[in-house]
Image (cartoon, rainbow, N blue to C red):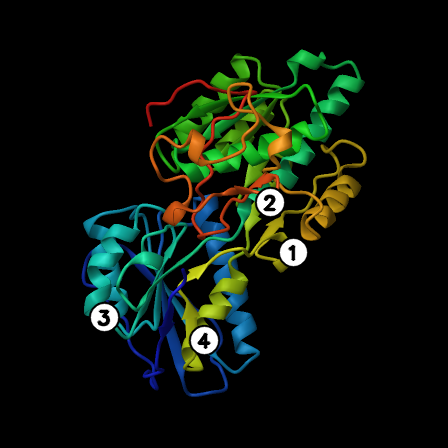
Amino acid sequence: MKKFLAVLLIFAMVFTFAACGGGETNEGGGDEQATDTTYKVGMVCIGDDNAAYDRNFYMAADAAKERLAGEGINVEWVYTYNHPEGDPVATDCEELAGAGCIAVFCNSYGMEPAMLTVAPDYPDTVFVGMTNEGSWKDDLPNTVNAFPSIYEGRYLAGVAAGMKLQDMIDNGEIKEDEAVIGYVGAYTFAEVISGYTSFFLGARSVCPSVTMKVEFIGSWGDPTMEANAAQDLIDKGAKLISQHSDSTTPATTAQSNGVPHVGYNISMSDVAPESSIISSRIDWTNYFTYVIETIVNGGTVDQDYCQHGFKDGDVALTELNEDVAAPGTGAKIAEVGAAIENGEIQVFDTSTFTVDGKEVTTAFALDTDGDFAPDSEEAVFDGAFHESYFQSAPYFALRIDGIELLNEKY
């Protein structure tokens, strides 16, 4: 199913990047390195420094730069900002490739169609559609996809949430039927569905009475809409807030209401120290390092980077806020994390959830759109739905019992 890309190293000098429209650009700084060759690497960003989602990428880029420097590979990152899709993304890709970037990473879903219009014109640049799926099955040799198994991190973060809710029940703060998670979601895409479902299953594994309400905002990130959705969920009875959205306002809204919070992408304990327990995140350091060193060394870049998760260090949790977390949360996360690593726990174990009251035995029986798994592969086998097993982009889109969607217009 996978194809491979052979990329010959052709860059032996430092290029000067000149932006000529499209988006605001910024060249990554850093100390001069010992060698004479610096390789430019571009990233098209959906947001900027204000978005938690993008800050997670910047942290990984800096970490990869440091790691590569230790190998004698000097990297200069070049960023474009605030372009989620369409012609501006295409312009950014053209400018970055034209400036001599050996790779261009497009960091969000929705950018890939524009990226694919540019890639044929720059065969010596590797274009990466992150959290996408089109590049691994197209005919272009210089386009690739990547998305680690974040659902594992979501499940572990859900365990932290469930521990908190169960502790609140045990302490008499809420009743069992009041253990409601409010979840701010971006869109009704498989990526979001997979995320909130794995989070819910992790929470329910330690708090059996938990239920969830999801409210979608129709945007990957909008601070005002995210805050409003979080407030609405709290008004509707949510006792804990989580999110698949790009800003920190769900965390600050939770804190202003005295409600605990579990985040995404970065630690949110700095902005909500009295509420935010932990966050799950993809750590892109391994992938950035892998792609860049592979190109520099004249090797091959895997067309579809999947099945890389918690045990590989590609999925991680931020530091646990012990002041907010329930007692024993750290130990429980370590226990469950080890079980995920050795395969003892499957996140989407089909014995742990139902759809319309029935256990799931085949993805095809519930698939009305024909796209739950790629290439007509059966995703349910060995007692579990195997998310991101056949391709890096998520395809779990089942609507399981116990989760109420408050709106589905996005």
Q: Earlier in the sequence, mark 3 or mark 2?
A: 3
Q: Nearer the viewer, residue 183 or 147?
A: 147
- Mark 1 in CB contact with mark 3 (< 8 angstroms): no
- Residue shown at the point (52%, 27%) measured from the top left: 183
Provide the residue designation for mark 2.
152
Left or right of 113: which side holds 401? right
Left or right of 294: which side holds 179? right
Whole-number angstrom distance, CA of label 2 to CA of label 1: 10 Å
- Mark 3 in CB contact with mark 4 (< 8 angstroms): no
- Mark 2 in CB contact with mark 4 (< 8 angstroms): no
- Crowdedness near tag 4: few (<14), some (14–19) or many (≥20) residues, C-alpha within 10 Å: some
Q: Position of residue 135 (x, y in %)?
A: 32, 57
Provide the residue designation for mark 1.
311
Whole-number angstrom distance, CA of label 4 to CA of label 1: 22 Å
- Residue 267 visible (yes or no): no
Q: What amino acid does circle 1 point to?
A: Lys
Q: Earlier in the sequence, mark 3 or mark 4?
A: 3
Q: Position of residue 344 (x, y in %)?
A: 71, 46
Provide the residue designation for mark 4.
294
